[in-house]
Amino acid sequence: MDSGNVAWILASSALVCLMIPALALFYGGMVGSRRILNMMMMCFGGASLVAVLWALFGYSMAFGDSVGGLGLIGDVAEYAGMGQLLAEDPAASIPPILFAAFQLFFACVTTALVAGAAAGRMKFGAWMIFAGVWATLVYFPIAHWVFAFSSEDGSVVGGWIANDLGAIDFAGGLAVHMNAGIAALALSLVLGRSHGWPTVDHAKPHSRPLILVGAGLLWIGWFGFNAGSALSAGQSASVVFLNTAVAASAGLLAWALVERIRNGAATSLGAASGLIAALVAITPACGAVSPMGALAIGAIAGAVCSLAVELKFRLGFDDSLDVVAVHLVGGILGTLLIGLFATEDAPNGVAGLFYGGGFELLGIQSLATVAVLAYSFVVTWVIAQVLQRTIGLRIEQEDEIRGIDIAAHSEFAYLTDEDPVDLGAPRP
């Protein structure tokens, strides 16, 4: 055991955990004042459920020995309950149970990201069922494909994207952001549009300061997300840390510049969105590029994702909090741009097209992208359709108009003269 590595991954795990309340604040500020509690509860509730499933069987599905050696899914019984991880492994740099804890929060955050597409119009109970089924059938298998590496001696077989295809995804462009983004698209299509979309007032962001606070905390948490994925406190983590910082900054500036040129003003919501879009894009590439490559990826993501927001209006799908524009588009950009900007001097040690590597890496990244998008969209769409046809996904229109916080949780986030009684828990 290396105490420095252990300390760094413990700290990184806490930083990734911070991303859950940070996302709740970020999403909460983006919805109307009578939707904020539900939005935050979807983040906390979905994440908590996934954490329980992770301990029961999720870790085993994601990181167990691949069933049949096919690289599609881990052995669900190998680490069920995680009791097998209690014994110390003297050959490991960090305890396997610490790695399981670190990856737990990846699963939690990914599921919470999907909630942004359903803001204000999905039954809370239906969301909780969806979150559990989606994590089981979509996230855990894809995490196995992308994150589960085979052991050096061949005794453990991992996922097909990581080992057979050899695609690069340092911290989760494929498994986390692209996966959540395409799932958000499928869910929003089955849910349908919010009442009065896209002009209704109650759906507009109610607190831009909350958005900025949430985005800032997400940026902090992202250092654990990306640099922690090096799994050691050394050169790789240091390169990734810097790449994450400069890419995020470039994305914020690029989105703000595009807004200024197109609309005459750089908004706080745009700045926060550009920051997150760049963080999404650099996530898969942070170990493959130089700081100059990170700047380029961040700037491209900030500019392109700002334009991608218009897709939902042009195509008519109600992705309430732009999960598609930021996480799907940003994830695709970051994954594919590895094929252009990767340099052998970076921790991943692979060259892209601009550094003499030819088109091979770009082709590998493209194949991995198509596979994840196809699987996640189809399975998510089926899950949502089954729930829609059985228990139903949508709240009543009347409850949607007056605010889902009252209908789902019997609470107001903010009391006014029009709300003389708090419908929350009784007080003594």
Image (tube, rainbow, N blue to C red):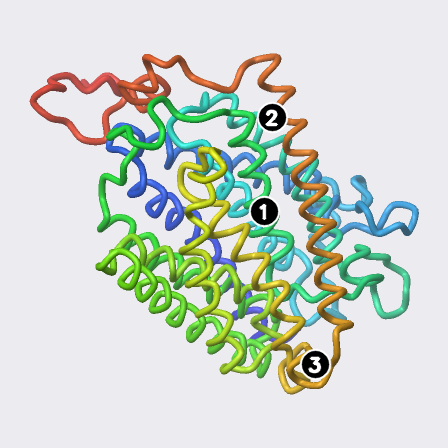
Q: Give the answer, above or below, for where 395 lies relative to 344.
A: above
How crowded pointer 2 is (Cα within 10 Å; few <14, some 14-19, many 20+) is rated as: many
Circle 2: residue type? Ala
Answer with the quarter of the image where residue 228 lies.
Answer: bottom right
Circle 1: residue type? Ala
C-beta proximity under 8 Å, tags 2 and 1: no
- Look at the numbered disc 1 and give the secondary structure of its residue: helix
- Checking the image for residue 70, the label placed there is none
Where does label 2 land, which residue?
Answer: 384
- Look at the numbered disc 2 and give the secondary structure of its residue: helix
- Comparing marks 1 and 3, which lies closer to the viewer? 3
Q: Where residue 361 appears, x then y in whole percent?
A: 74, 71
Where does label 3 land, which residue?
Answer: 351
- Look at the numbered disc 3 and give the secondary structure of its residue: loop
How crowded pointer 3 is (Cα within 10 Å; few <14, some 14-19, many 20+) is rated as: many
Apparent side of residue 296 relative to residue 411 in the rendered image (left or right): right
Q: Where residue 83 appears, x then y in whole percent?
A: 71, 45
Q: Quadrant of the N terminus?
A: bottom right
Q: Where residue 186 appears, x then y in whole percent?
A: 58, 34
Where does label 1 land, which residue?
Answer: 107
Residue at 34% over, 32% down: 198
Circle 3: residue type? Ala
Viewer-proximal residue, 400 or 13?
400
Residue at 80% over, 45% down: 73
